[in-house]
């Protein structure tokens, strides 16, 4: 199915959202980039990555919003310097310290506002299965519920579809799809700890490195450490 329409894509600067941009484009949407800085440790590098990707794909628009309230609310190792970013524990079923309370609801609310104002017909988010294993606001049920919020809370003539195309996929699936679509992963950033080089040992780095290792392609960004995460 193809569309001659626009879609708002939540673009963090990471590999999942970059792949979501290319997936939206593959489906015929013209992407409108929405990037938010919320006081995360690597916000400058993430913004640089999102801005570069927008230039690469010649995005129809790039909206950058600073959401300081998430940092002020705190309770996440991404926004609070007093909470350490944990090393990767890829078997844990606990909610990690990197969880930002109800972040995706905040981001999707802004994306819906932006989409309605621009007349966009979809909102894309790159959340996936290994996310919702630890983050409650990445579960399929959350996105289904938020679609109802969008339908009820927008104008009667507004029709916005919430798209989470990778919600049942692994990170490896996303990497494989992105390589197929030609996503320039060298312009993305996933590390929770550092803006250069990536640490290689936080949860986000570990899942990313594991995905590239499983598809047999070297991750093109720089790491301080490159552990082997393939059993």
Image (tube, rainbow, N blue to C red):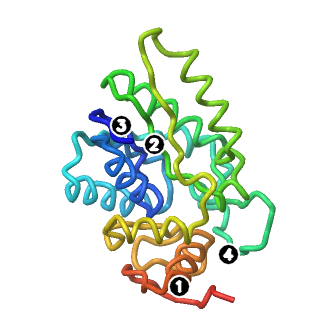
Among numbered discs 2 and 3, the one appearing first in the sequence: 3
Among numbered discs 1 and 4, the one appearing first in the sequence: 4
- Say which quadrant the C terminus sits in: bottom right
- Say which quadrant the N terminus sits in: top left
Residue 106 falls left or right of residue 59? right
Which residue has dot 3 on it?
7
Which residue has dot 4 on it?
88
- Residue 9, numbered label: none
Tags 2 and 3 touching, CB below 8 Å: yes
Residue 26 falls left or right of residue 206? left
- Residue 124, numbered label: 2
Name the secondary structure under disc 4: loop
- Residue 213, numbered label: 1
Q: Nearer the viewer, residue 13 or 29?
A: 29
Residue in view at x 72 percent, y 47 percent? 136
The crowd level at tag 4 (other Cα within 10 Å; few <14, some 14-19, many 20+) is some
Query: From mark 4 to mark 2, how far is it between C-alphas?
Result: 27 Å
């Amino acid at each position: 199915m193809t569309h001659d329409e626009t879609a708002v894509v939540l673009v963090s600067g990471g590999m999942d959202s970059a792949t979501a941009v290319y997936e939206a484009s593959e489906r015929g949407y013209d992407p409108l980039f929405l990037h938010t800085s919320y006081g995360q440790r690597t916000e400058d590098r993430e913004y640089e990555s999102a801005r570069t990707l927008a230039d690469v794909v010649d995005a129809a628009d790039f909206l950058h919003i600073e959401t300081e309230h998430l940092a002020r609310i705190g309770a996440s190792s991404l926004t609070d310097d007093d909470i350490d970013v944990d090393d990767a524990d890829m078997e844990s079923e606990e909610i990690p310290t990197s969880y930002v309370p109800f972040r995706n609801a905040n981001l999707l609310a802004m994306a819906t506002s932006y989409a309605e104002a621009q007349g966009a017909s979809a909102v894309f988010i790159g959340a996936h299965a290994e996310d919702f294993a630890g983050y409650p606001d990445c579960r399929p049920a959350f996105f289904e519920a938020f679609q109802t919020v969008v339908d009820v809370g927008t104008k009667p003539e507004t029709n916005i579809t919430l798209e989470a195309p990778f919600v049942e996929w692994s990170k490896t699936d996303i990497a494989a799809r992105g390589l197929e679509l030609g996503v320039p992963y060298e312009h993305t950033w996933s590390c929770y700890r550092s803006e250069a080089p990536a640490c290689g040992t936080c949860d986000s780095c570990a899942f990313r490195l594991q995905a590239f290792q499983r598809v047999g392609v070297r991750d093109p960004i720089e790491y301080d450490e490159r552990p082997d995460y393939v059993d």
